[in-house]
């Protein structure tokens, strides 16, 4: 079988060679820093952001479960409440409390610490949430 380049002119061969010379330059500075750090001096590649806290602005239906740094929806809260073995179907957490009425609906609000509880044993229907009394 003939080689594919045999029928090409020298000019076309040179253009093909130009495309394949030079190669790519790999940037390995970050990898080099990671590999060559001293033992015990490792730095995290990702920084964890501070989670929501009391007083932060929030959207309706946002909750933060205990010891977690991210917002979840009502379904996750109900699942969490069901797994709790102590007391009635309730838990302490942060929840979004709407503060502004916009066109008859609760708008943006603020995160509040308090208790949310299920109205029924099987956690059906909306949650009742109450601000913690200090």
Image (cartoon, rainbow, N blue to C red):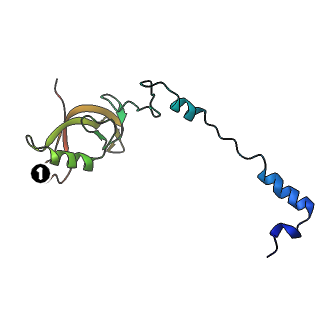
Q: Residue furthest left?
A: 87
Q: Residue furthest bottom?
A: 1
Q: Position of residue 57 (x, y in %)?
A: 36, 33
Quarter of the image for the C terminus: give it.
Answer: top left
Q: 108 or 62, which lies in front?
A: 62
Element type where label 1 sits in the image: loop
Q: Position of residue 108 (x, y in %)?
A: 36, 38
Q: Position of residue 81 (x, y in %)?
A: 17, 45
Q: Residue furthest right?
A: 10
Residue at 51% of width from left, 31% of height from top? 34
Which residue is tagged 1?
120
Residue at 60% of width from left, 32% of height from top? 29
Q: 113 or 60, which lies in front?
A: 113
Which picture quadrant has residue 6? bottom right
Q: Is residue 9 above or below residue 114?
A: below
Which picture quadrant has residue 32? top right
């Amino acid at each position: 079988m003939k080689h594919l380049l045999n029928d090409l002119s020298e000019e076309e061969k040179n253009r093909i060679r130009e495309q394949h010379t030079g190669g790519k330059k790999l940037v390995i500075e970050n990898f080099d820093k990671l590999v060559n750090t001293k033992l015990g001096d490792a730095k995290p590649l990702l920084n964890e952001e501070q989670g929501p806290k009391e007083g932060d602005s929030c959207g309706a239906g946002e909750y933060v479960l205990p010891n977690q740094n991210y917002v979840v929806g009502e379904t996750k809260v109900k699942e969490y409440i069901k797994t709790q073995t102590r007391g009635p179907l309730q838990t302490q957490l942060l929840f979004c409390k709407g503060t502004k009425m916009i066109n008859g609906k609760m708008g943006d609000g603020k995160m509040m610490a308090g208790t949310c509880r299920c109205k029924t044993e099987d956690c059906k229907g909306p949650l009742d949430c109450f601000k913690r009394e200090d």
